[in-house]
Image: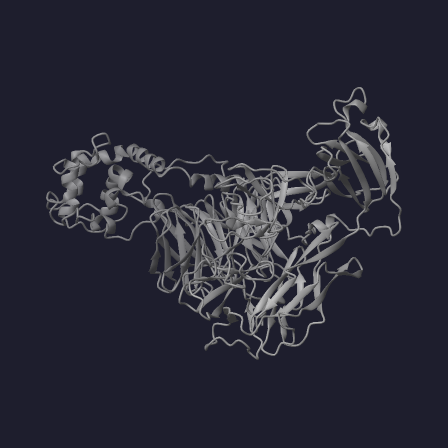
Amino acid sequence: MIQTAIMTSIAARFFSRRFLVTVWAICFLILCQPFSALSSRSFGSDGETSPDYQKDVQPLLLKYCGNCHSGTEKEGEFSIASLETLMAGTPKGAVIMPRDGEQSKLIGLIRGKIEPKMPPEEEPQPTEAEINLIASWINAGALASASAPPPLRMRLNVPKIAAKSNVVAPYTSAIVLPGGIDVLLGRYGELEQVRIATGEVVKQWKDFAGKVTSLRLSSDGKAVIAAGGVEGVGGEVAAIDIASGELRMKLEGHSDIIYSAVLSPDNKVLATAGYDRAIRLWDVTTGQVIKTLLGHNGAIYDLDFDPTGRVLASASADETVKLWQVSTGTRLDTLSQGEKEQYAVRFDPNGKSIFAAGADKKIRRWQLVSIDQPAINPIREARFAHEGAVLGIRVSRDGRWLMSVGQDGTVKQWTTPDLRLAGTLVQNQTETVAAEFQSASSDDVLQNVVSIARKGKPLIAPLFPEPGITDRSEASMNQIVAATGGTTVQEVSEIEPNSVLAQAMPLTIPASVKGVIDPATAASDAKEDVDIYRFTAKKGEVWIAEIHAARGGSPLDSRVDIMSADGSPVLRVNLQAVRESYFTFRGKDSATVDDFRLHKWQEMELNEYLYSDGEVVKLWLYPRGPDSGFKVYPGYGSRYTFFDTTATAHALGAPAYVVQPLAPSESPILNGLPTFPIYYENDDESQREWGNDSKLTFTAPADGDFLVRVRDSRGFGGPEHKYSLTLRPSKPDFEVKLENVDLTIPVSRGREFTVTAKRIDGFEGPINIELQGLPEGLQVTTPLTIEAGQNKAIGTIFANQDTKIPTEKEVLEVGLKAVAQILDGNVEHAVNGILKLRLAAADAKPEVAVLIEPLKLDGNVDANPIREIEIVVIPGTTTSAKLRIERNGQEGPIAFGNEDCGRNLPHGVFVDNIGLNGLLLPDGQTEREFFITAAPWVKPQVRYFHLRSQSAGNPTSRPIKIRIGNP
């Protein structure tokens, strides 16, 4: 039972060390009888042989001192784990004086002549004969054994208990060998090379001290590194030549079992680690340890080199992954986002990402930036992967796929780098072993899982299926259907009673119904008055149900939902939770867009959906430091909700989940987190413009009859609770209005204007803004685009020295138009507002002049540069630029804003590292470096941005080109 064995093996790692040491103590007590013969022996006299350290002395030290002074849990910084540590003594000095046993501190402690007596009185005590034996060994010079040390398994002095004949040791590790024909399987004391197709044992290696816990291929695929050892005693690692089967190297090291051993890509350095929390780097040629890396506070379960061999990653029970510089041993970074033990770590083949997983059921991806010097490696993805601990991960050789093996008995395939589920390869499998990826054919079909019922039965190595990733965007589930042109909306009045299904009032849509929620008109058996209407729709049609009540003064707090003909709710979308969180620091009311402080916010990304207590919002802007939280859409005003859910207040500590939308036909992922069904229903319109009135977008899932129900969300009613229900086709559209319509611009300065879009019936595409009739001498943010999914764009108009606009006594009016593509055609609308421009008087008080330039430029502020400056930011990185000002007599600090200081930057691109004071030039300073960061998902594009001073007049820089992507 392979999976069971592996889980048992891993579970054994978590037994307390005190428990294990107690077991060793019991074992040694059992051996008291053989040692009792020592009472009749004496050492050190003429003609007698001196005691042997490993045969006679070390077992006694382990028996009486091992509880407190062996392995990693040594008290008083004194260890008897080896002769070297014994002779090293304590920080206060040596405990052994060779050739003088009675004056040695060790003997004094054992005899009670030195306090505190060791072992303590409540522990088993050595006999006088045993004490004399240790003293005799010291008197003889405290020498090491003359013969070579026996194998590890020979040093474990415990009784040998014969196994039952029908018991076969379980496999504890596996690796598919190059070519995909054979698999190498490890168990206690041996390795087997097995033919996958038949289960035939091709080769066998038996000379291993303990359990084989790790099997890793060399980078050239010619050798396998096998590692393991004996718990509480030491580790063992061996190299096996695959072609010949020859054992090329065998090393012993560590004070406990080894859990991982891996060769560097050039096969020159071997890295090992295990329960003793230390990483050792070995020179493969000499077999000598060249470095020991310390820093983990728990057992180390996995290691991996990056493709260059310069960086080593380690995954530990201390809930962290650490990165180390191989050449110097310097710790480059600690990835501390893990919430429980981390069992597995891997680099991708291109060396750009680090993947790790463990007992918290998650897989995480970090971007690798700390290669040559310490740096923070930003986390990019975090996914709940399994309903149990993730025991292992592997990345395919081409870097396209990641496989994970869970304690829940499943094996899953994920796309990289975004960690989206591509398929479940094995389900409900109790006998799976994760194996290394190997190319099995010319088209790089990958063998990745070995399933074994028991020894001697056929093995199965399933291949990766083609990924079946479903488009889960909201747009794919809400197809926009063009409205029927010229259709007349039927206006009717409600016919009572219509509060039960059988009495539902039929409507021919599109239609508008005038009704009232009044219990006096409800059916006699109805608990409250609800109005139900029946209509017919075809599959894929998109209809809008909207209520007009509160806006007209009605006390009705409407709620509208759409049901199937039998009265059952219609499922709109399933929201699959992929990360869990909760509100920290403070709760949230039902309107605020800012300061969403969430547990594990570092694992969240912009544009992800956040679900809490029935409400769905979307993350809009990252927290700007430890004392801030996310902003959610739209980034200003009252927050939007998605899928027509209703905004609500959230208490401190209330649970929240990052969710992914699944179409009703999609099966949720079994990842241990809930799935939230969202039905077609709405309380308050999701863009918060209609107060208590409702608006619901409905996409018919099939041809047939449906019911729309109107009620008061509180259960209230009366003759004054009037409403109008409209059922109409969806007609995506937009409106744009202009803010800051009257601008007076000084020469060599800029002024800002804003355009805001109102998006109608689900239209989310980009909107281009064009300014008409601009004279020469002006630099304008152009093209000015309201990005897809966003509602605002901010432009600036900068007056050069040769501008042609009138002076402040006159005015130039500039019209704006907005153009967007909706469905298959362009839609053009005039912008609501006229831009009025004036040139400031020549004698006006000079304002601060603002200039942006790359860091490499020097010199004074150039108010009229002839060149166009371009700043390039690669997605997922940060770029520096320089801000210069000319104060013109203005003293004191000059501020440029906080999280909004980068004006008109693309969504997901922002001015970074500004702290609580924002982008600021203190009194007396005229320049500073500032940083622009682009989130990794931002698409390549060119855009113009500017900075705006908060000094008098709010002057801006001229618009500067920023390019996202390669220059």
Q: Position of residue 810 (x, y in %)?
A: 66, 70
Question: Is residue 4 something that shows in the picture?
Answer: yes
Q: Residue at x 51, y 77 (%)?
A: 862
Q: Position of residue 109 (x, y in %)?
A: 16, 39
The colour scheme used here is one colour
Q: Is residue 550 left or right of residue 386?
A: right
In terms of image quadrants, where is residue 927?
Answer: bottom left
Quadrant position of the N terminus in the picture: top right
Q: Position of residue 124 (x, y in %)?
A: 24, 31
Most distant residue in the front direction: 809
Which of the two residues, 8 or 653, is positioned nearer the viewer here? Answer: 653
Which of the two residues, 553 or 905, is positioned nearer the viewer here? Answer: 553
Q: Position of residue 654 (x, y in %)?
A: 54, 37
Q: Residue at x 76, y 39 (%)?
A: 547
Number of numbered callouts drawn: 0
Most distant residue in the top direction: 524
Which of the two residues, 932 or 772, is positioned nearer the viewer here? Answer: 772
Rendered view: 529 above or below 835: above
Q: Is residue 71 left or right of residue 558?
A: left
Question: Is residue 961 something that shows in the picture?
Answer: no
Quadrant position of the C terminus in the picture: bottom right
Which of the two residues, 718 or 345, is positioned nearer the viewer here? Answer: 718
Q: Is residue 291 left or right of residue 51?
A: right
